Image: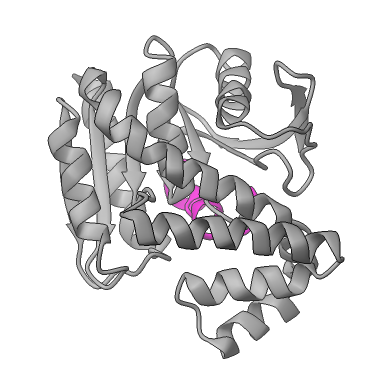
Amino acid sequence: MHTLNSADNTPIAYETAGAGPLLIIVTGALNTHNFGVPGEMVPFLQDAFTVLTYDRRGRGQSGDTPPYSVFKELEDLEALIDHHGGKTFLYGHSSGAALSLFAASEFPQKVSAVAAYEPPLAGGWFEKLLSGFFLRYINRRVSHGDKLAVVFRFMRFVGMDENLIEETLAGEHGQTIIDMALTITNEIKIQQTSKLFLRSKAKDLRQPVLMLAGTKSFKTAPGIMVDFTHAIPLAESCLLEGQTHSVEPQVIAPVIKAFFLQLQNN
């Protein structure tokens, strides 16, 4: 792992593999650079790209500097881009997909194109109310030292069954996941920001964007994919048959690889 400092002096840990144009992978909730679907995609992409994976702030080997803001995460991405030539493709998963789209809007000269798998999108007043309650629940439980309860509840919320949760937390990355409990509040803030982005900034994106979702994921995922595709001028969409929110790397990697290489070759 290598480390660089973001704009607020927070150390961000990352590693690279392969050769070719830069492709930064932005992970979702409770993932690190080498745990979760995005990290598992590296072997399928490193023959065509310099693939950079990193621990988002507050995760893994990266540091954290409170208070949290979504823009600080964008500054982390900018620091990584600038350190590696100033231009990149972005692939983001879940909240990482939202961050990738936000970064494309914030740094249009530095982000060449984005592939985004199932970014979160805040819904109506009832969902916002639940998010507010969940934020308070997380802060209360973490303050009492009960990170495990927070992680367990979040995993159930995103559709994991109890056997899979217990198996995951008992594995080699279990303690790392538990240690990231407080970062779940960051994911909720990203979700809340997505609605504003879709309404006010998506229409101004000028980069090519590939929106993706799975047919066996959350019921709202295909509709959210369509909403973003309609809002972003140069967006196209791809619905992956049989895929859940935990999309299989061997299924999605060839799709985004073809998308980025076509742009690279034009």
Image colouring: one colour
**Does the magenta-highlighted stretch encompass residue 36?**
yes
Foreground residue, 261 or 174? 174
Task: Give the residue at the far bottom of this rendering.
Answer: 163
Q: Is residue 141 left or right of residue 168?
A: right
Could you tell me which residue is drawn at 28 percent across and 34 percent down? 198
Could you tell me which residue is drawn at 51 percent across and 30 percent down? 19
The residue segment tinted magenta is: 32-46
Looking at the rendering, in which quadrant would you find the C terminus? top left
Q: Is residue 241 left or right of residue 107?
A: left
Q: Is residue 261 left or right of residue 79?
A: left
**In this view of the protein, can residue 34 be seen by the observer?**
no
> How many tags in the picture?
0
**In this view of the protein, can residue 22 be seen by the observer?**
yes
Position of residue 256 relative to residue 198, above or below, is below
Q: Is residue 208 left or right of residue 22?
A: left
Could you tell me which residue is drawn at 20 percent across and 23 percent down? 203
Foreground residue, 100 or 201? 201
Residue 46 spot, x, y in % from top left: 48, 41
Residue 55 spot, x, y in % from top left: 67, 42
Residue 158 spot, x, y in % from top left: 47, 70
Position of residue 246 relative to residue 226, above or below, is below
Looking at the rendering, in which quadrant would you find the N terminus? top right
Q: Quadrant of residue 163?
A: bottom right
Residue 216 spot, x, y in % from top left: 27, 73
Position of residue 3 relative to residue 85, above or below, is below
**Does the magenta-highlighted stretch encompass residue 242?**
no
Position of residue 9 relative to residue 134, above or below, is above
